[in-house]
Image (spheres, rainbow, N blue to C red):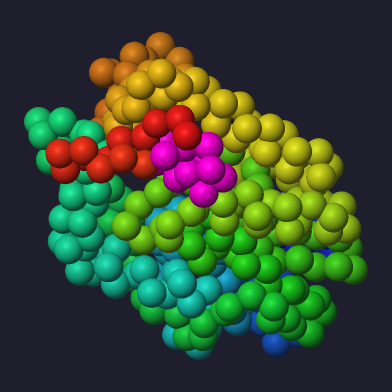
Amino acid sequence: MEIAPGVYLLRVPLPVSHLDYLNCYLVEGKNGWLMVDTGWYTQQSFQALQNGLRDLGLDFSDIATIVVTHVHPDHFGLAGRIKQVSPHTRLLAHKWEWALIESRYIRFGELQQQMGGLLRRHGVPEPKLPAMQAASLPVIEFVSITMPDEPLYGGETICTGRYELEVIWTPGHSSGHICLYEPTHGLLFSGDHILPGITPNVSYHVQSGDNPLGDFLYSLQKLRNLPADHILPAHEHVFSGLSRRISEILEHHERRKEEILSLIHREPGAAYDVSSRTTWDIPDLSWDEFPPQLQRIAITETIAHLEYMRWEGRVRRIQHEGLILYGAA
């Protein structure tokens, strides 16, 4: 699908994922093409990407540069495989994302232990801890590990010879998430930061910083007045109406904050208890039927909202017998 002259969308399937596919974008250049995000490391995904390139008369050796918006497996997973077949291809990622690769995909035991401690402090019952602590391990097999060739920080311009793309740092969903903005055609490659129909997971965890939701909301506001006519997200479909969509996402988080605040209004509670009583958009499943990965996401999202409201002065954090409780201020 051609989005703009020399800008193409390839849909890469994501087997065994709740999302059907990743949107991989190709941007034409004078000395090779730019790829934005890769899909994850499965033969099916690799073959789909290869077929899409072939339909454009290209192969992997025509990719001069890969930019990953962040290093979650569905965006970063195939980067190492592509570099194996095209060693000259350069990989760019934000410096914060670079710092996460080793701890998440190579030496992940320590991170597991740290996450177990965090979940315990926020009220996860001991019998549930082992499964929840290990819930992210299965995705490691979908990553072909490689290290970036060059760090990004935000503010750079990536030149393809045909287009100039501004790197915009948009932390929240991940600490080093970036978007790319192309002003001539008003294109915003938004990664997972802004999606047309769903909101990205914004979680508090041991690598997120102390206010990930605050980072995310600020990053949304930063883009609000950007003259972007076409938003190219990593999932779902290309859309327009950037300011309107940002308003919808902000309103969603305001509603979630108010719901959580109502749950701790009379009595402080741990994040596990609060999240178990929060409304989640997962039909036909009660809280106890959520698989460990979904419970973990719900808990860490709840902590992110509670911590954001703590910095707003609306919530107080209480240390009680090794647990962290939250109450209305």
Majority secondary structure in the magenta region: helix
Q: Nearer the viewer, residue 184 or 127?
A: 127
Q: Is residue 252 visible?
A: yes
> How far across and down, in percent of the image, does residue 156 sit?
69, 81
Residues in magenta, as a range: 302-316
Q: Nearer the viewer, residue 204 or 313?
A: 313
At horizontal 32% and vertical 57% (from top left) the residue drawn is 206
Is 309 magenta? The answer is yes
Q: Is 239 positioned to the left or the right of 48 in the image?
A: right
Q: Nearer the viewer, residue 160 or 33?
A: 160
Q: Is 104 positioned to the left or the right of 29 in the image?
A: left
Q: Is 277 positioned to the left or the right of 134 in the image?
A: right
At horizontal 38% and vertical 74% (from top left) the residue drawn is 99
Asked if residue 95 is positioned above or below residue 31 in the image, the reply reads above
Is 289 magenta? The answer is no
Residue most extreme to the left? 127
Asked if residue 225 is positioned above or below residue 254 in the image, the reply reads below
Q: Is residue 19 visible?
A: no
> How far across and down, in percent of the image, does residue 30 sit?
76, 85
Q: Nearer the viewer, residue 328 or 66?
A: 328
At horizontal 53% and vertical 37% (from top left) the residue drawn is 314
Asked if residue 188 is positioned above or below residue 242 in the image, the reply reads below
> How far across and down, in percent of the image, does residue 318 sit?
31, 40
